[in-house]
Image (tube, grey):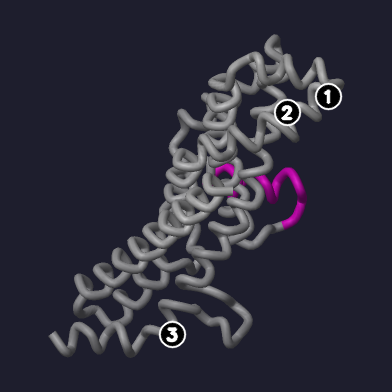
Amino acid sequence: MIANITVITDNLDYLLWGRMAQGEPGGVLLTLMMAFGAGVLALPGGIALACLAWRYSGIVRRVLFAWAELIRGIPLIFVIFWLWYLLPMMMGIDLPGAVTVTLALAWFTSASVMHSTLAGLQALPNGQYEAAQTQGFSPWQALRLILLPQVLRNVLPSLVGIFIGLLKDTSLAFIVNVPELTTVAGQVNSRVQIYPAAIFIFVGVVYYLLCSGLGVLARRWQRRALQS
């Protein structure tokens, strides 16, 4: 039992930070950086696409729905592979693996954010939008100032679930050898070649703490929003 714990404590810095001292973040730190970066891109991107689909109900909505269904119907691991090979060909430069995975996660997650936000918009009574128009609000002003604040409060549990999934999906970065938590855990396991159960139980506990912590923060924010 003590030896099981020792294999974690001896490699804890590497599991948490990677080679941060050499300017190469990894482990838990890189996992959080990728999740945060993808979330920062996916949330406003998905909301913007939902607003477009809500505002323009014709061909624009159909095209956006087709795009979202295509992305949601493809395993994320293939999206990562496509961007890993296609972006250098299209842009003529080699992007860091962490950047490529972050973009793939953002692209994939924005489709789910769009679906959730659009469902929230469609669930609101039509009278709110009509009342805003009679008060002189433009369609975009009504959307930004009146409808979206309500929608985001209503769909917060759904968004939290989406971003918890995003956090867990960072583990797929191991397929392109990005040194996030799962990858460095595998490296530690290959190096020491003992106690793999202890190493990956530690990884599972870390993911659980990160995801449950995100859920707790979201619930606190929602309670404060409802009280205000």
- Residue 31, compared with residue 90, is above or below; it is below
Residue type at numbered disc 1: Phe
Q: Name the residue: 36% across, 72% down.
A: 185
Q: Residues within 10 Å of mark 1 (few under 14, many from 20)?
A: some
Residue 66 in sight: no
Of labels 1 and 3, the one closer to you: 1
Measured along the vertical axis of the image, is residue 115 above or below residue 201?
above
Tag 1 residue:
137
Residue at image location 59% in from the left, 77% down from the top: 24
Q: Residue furthest front?
A: 227
Residue 51, image x, y percentages? 69, 27
Instruction: Identify the disc placed on residue 13.
Output: 3
Q: Residue at x 64, y 62 (%)?
A: 96
Whether 212 is among the magenta residues is no
- Are the residues at dot 2 and dot 1 in contact (C-beta closer than 8 Å)? no
Q: Amino acid at mark 2?
A: Leu
* Residue 134 screen position, x and y as percent: 81, 15
Instruction: Determine which quarter of the picture holds residue 146.
Output: top right
Report, in whole angstroms, how far the alpha carbon at label 2 lies from the one at label 1: 9 Å
Amino acid type, mark 3: Asp
Q: Which residue is mark 2?
A: 143
**In front here: 142 or 48?**
142
Give the SS element for disc 3.
Answer: helix
Percent across and percent down for residue 205 are 30, 67
Eye-nearest disc, 2 or 1: 1
Distance of label 1 from label 3 (alpha carbons): 54 Å
The earlier-in-sequence mark between 2 and 3 is 3
Instruction: Please give the range of residues in magenta.
Output: 80-93
